[in-house]
Amino acid sequence: MTDKSLVSYCGLYCGDCHGYKGSIADLASDLRKELKKYNFDEVAKVIPFKEFKNYPECYECLGAMEHLRCEGCQEGERSKYCNIAQCTQKKEFQGCWECDEFETCPEFDFLKPVHRDANLKNLKKIKKEGLEGFLEGKRHW
């Protein structure tokens, strides 16, 4: 099932994201609980592998991963911190697909390391086929 409100301003589909699904956050939380249950902080001190010296940082990183949750760009809080969302809202666009400059927009640069050009492919599809066509077909992530 797809939902129009989960189409992000930048063209990604929030329903495909680990943040919206909460999968990584849930796994990180569960792992921290298990590690705490077995006092693994003490166990790590006696394991003779150099990697376990970094255990406190690993545990802290898992704690940060517990916060990797998102309600979606259109409905959630993250849009308050996103330059793409703020630009789109300022222009009173439903999404970047309504902007004539989206193909060269520098605001997408931070997406490239993870998503490469997926959002641009999606934006082109939305512009061509509309939201319904985009939601029915293949989405890039």
Image (cartoon, grey):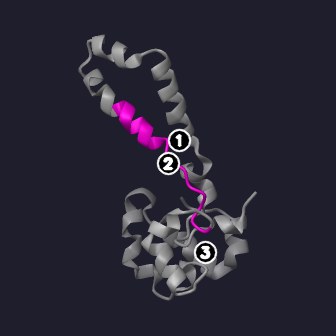
Residue at 58% x, 84% y is: 93
- Examine the rendered structure and indicate whether residue 34 appears above or below residue 79: above
C-alpha span from label 1 to label 3:
31 Å
Q: Which residue is mark 2?
A: 68
Residue type, label 1: Ala
- Along the line of sight, which residue is nearer the eye, 135 or 73? 73
C-alpha span from label 2 to label 3:
28 Å
Q: Which residue is mark 1?
A: 25
Residue at 57% x, 68% y is: 8
Image quarter in which the N terminus is found: bottom right
Which stretch is magenta?
58-74
Task: Determine the secondary structure under disc 1.
Answer: helix
Q: Earlier in the sequence, mark 1 or mark 3?
A: 1
Left or right of 42 on screen, residue 33: right
Task: Determine the secondary structure under disc 2.
Answer: loop
C-alpha span from label 1 to label 2:
6 Å
Residue type, label 3: Lys
Q: Earlier in the sequence, mark 2 or mark 3?
A: 2
Question: What is the quadrant of residue 116 in the picture?
Answer: bottom left
Task: Determine the secondary structure under disc 3.
Answer: helix
Number of residues whose C-alpha sits closer than 10 Å to that of mark 2, classed few (under 14), some (14–19) or many (20 or more): some
Question: Are the residues flagged by discs 1 and 2 in contact, CB closer than 8 Å?
Answer: yes
Question: What is the quadrant of residue 16 in the picture?
Answer: bottom right
- Residue 95 image position (x, y, % from top left): 57, 78
- Along the line of sight, which residue is nearer the eye, 116 or 88? 88
Residue 60 within the magenta-colored segment of the rendering = yes
Please state which of the two labelled residues, at mark 1 or mark 3, is closer to the viewer: 1
Residue 138 within the magenta-colored segment of the rendering = no
> Residue placed farthest to the right in the image?
1
Residue type, label 2: Leu
Instruction: Tell me the tag on residue 125.
Output: 3
Question: Are the residues flagged by discs 2 and 3 in contact, CB closer than 8 Å?
Answer: no
